Image: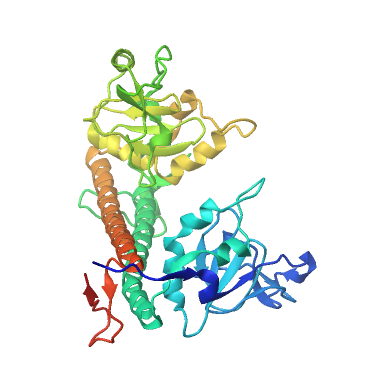
Amino acid sequence: MNKVLRTAQLGDLATITMGQSPDSAAVNGAEVGLPFLQGCAEFGARFPQPRFHCSPPLRVAKSGSILISVRAPVGTTNRADQDYCIGRGLGAVLAKPGVADKVFLLHAIDANLEFLHRRSQGSTFLAIGSKELSSLPVPAPEFAVQRRIAEILSTLDEAIEQTEALIAKHQQIKAGLMHDLFTRGVTPDGHLRPTREQAPDLYKESPLGWIPKEWEVVTTEEKVDVIDPQPDHRTPPEMLDGYPYVGIGDVMPSGELDFTHARKVAAEAYRRQLQSFEIHPGAFIFGKIGTLGQPTRIPHERCFAVSANVVLLTTSIKNDADFVFWIYSSPFIDGQVADATNTTSQPALGIQRIRKFHIPWPTRLEERSDIALRLKSITETIQADERTREKLRQQKHGLMHDLLTGRVRVKAERYDYPGKAEVER
């Protein structure tokens, strides 16, 4: 039977410094004094990215400290890669030498943030004080075991960071590719056209800027059906059973629809809505109320009703639907959405305005298809990277639980090569 790891309060393992807001006159952009952090707004992936300095500093987070947000949002962490002046939105946790390992302590804090969330208090926003932070219970194995656990978890952290860097690289490639494809296009032999600077005779001016001579600028409605779904309000979408009723609020960060928490409509309401339009493969929704834009593909094989906060764009030619989807994901449409937005009330787009949005249109179907396929390919690469990152995060979460609860026991000895986790189950 596995023994549960001994626990202690955070204040027993670390020195805790709570931030204090300096006088505004002490904060400067001239890099005088220490870098200043008021809260977690300037936290980075691992280390902060401060914009201001403070002289003289009132409260200092020493290099090597764990920086933790103590005001909404409570519990966000970063690492201090140098000394920082910290404002009242932050606390600094400095591991006691020989008592606690700073990397182990960071994981131990992250694993028990629910304790801090439960103790957050405040009439206007959530916050914790030094008492709550100091009393945070954390596992407290011997120091050598802490170091070994930190090494194991750091291996996964590095893999996650490398995957995130790969995602960022591929996203940059996609942005550059999208720009090139929508300004230069693809020739019949599969190559990008020379740039306008290299071959000005291949281009012409248009309302969307310079485009290849063979292209047109058309309105969306000339090539695509833009449908206002007109939901049936006679059946409130609050049922436990029925067809999903999806809108822009059901879009995941990945850009895919999540049907898990979608509201429901009865079968007759779904059928009445479906009678008014036909959904073809490659169709997508586009936010027109509240959250504007964000084109999101909809699965052709699913049966569902569509919310009033979106429009539906569909065409019987799937390759054209794919091409238009990428156009609607590009700066061509972003600029037109910004121009059309009514900023005096809730952001909204009229369906007639969306139908009149201008889009570039290569006259060859093969060119439109080629552009869509290339963007699909790089997107699938990014999605594969994101799945890898999620898998690594899940592995880390499970391993953190096992190691920090004692379910998996770690030996403190050093081994022949780094990264080889010796465990006793």
Q: Position of residue 188 (x, y in %)?
A: 21, 48
Number of numbered tags placed on the structure image: 0
Q: Nearer the viewer, residue 90 or 83?
A: 90
Q: Nearer the viewer, residue 403 or 202?
A: 403
Left or right, residue 341 beside residue 259: right
Q: Nearer the viewer, residue 398 or 281?
A: 398
Residue at the image position 51 percent from the left and 42 percent from the top: 335
Q: Position of residue 12 (x, y in %)?
A: 53, 74
Q: Quadrant of the C terminus?
A: bottom left
Figure check: 354 above or below 361: above
Instruction: Determine which quarter of the picture holds residue 147.
Output: bottom left
Left or right, residue 235 beside residue 335: left
Residue at the image position 24 percent from the left and 27 percent from the top: 316
Residue 11 can be seen in this image: yes
Residue 206 can be seen in this image: no
Figure check: 184 above or below 64: above
Instruction: Determine which quarter of the picture holds residue 143.
Output: bottom left
Q: Position of residue 40 (x, y in %)?
A: 57, 61
Figure check: 65 above or below 293: below
Give the color scheme: rainbow, by chain, secondary structure or one colour.
rainbow
Left or right, residue 5 beside residue 14: left
Q: Quadrant of the N terminus?
A: bottom left
Figure check: 345 above or below 387: above
Residue at the image position 27 percent from the left and 78 percent from the top: 419
Q: Position of residue 13 (x, y in %)?
A: 51, 76
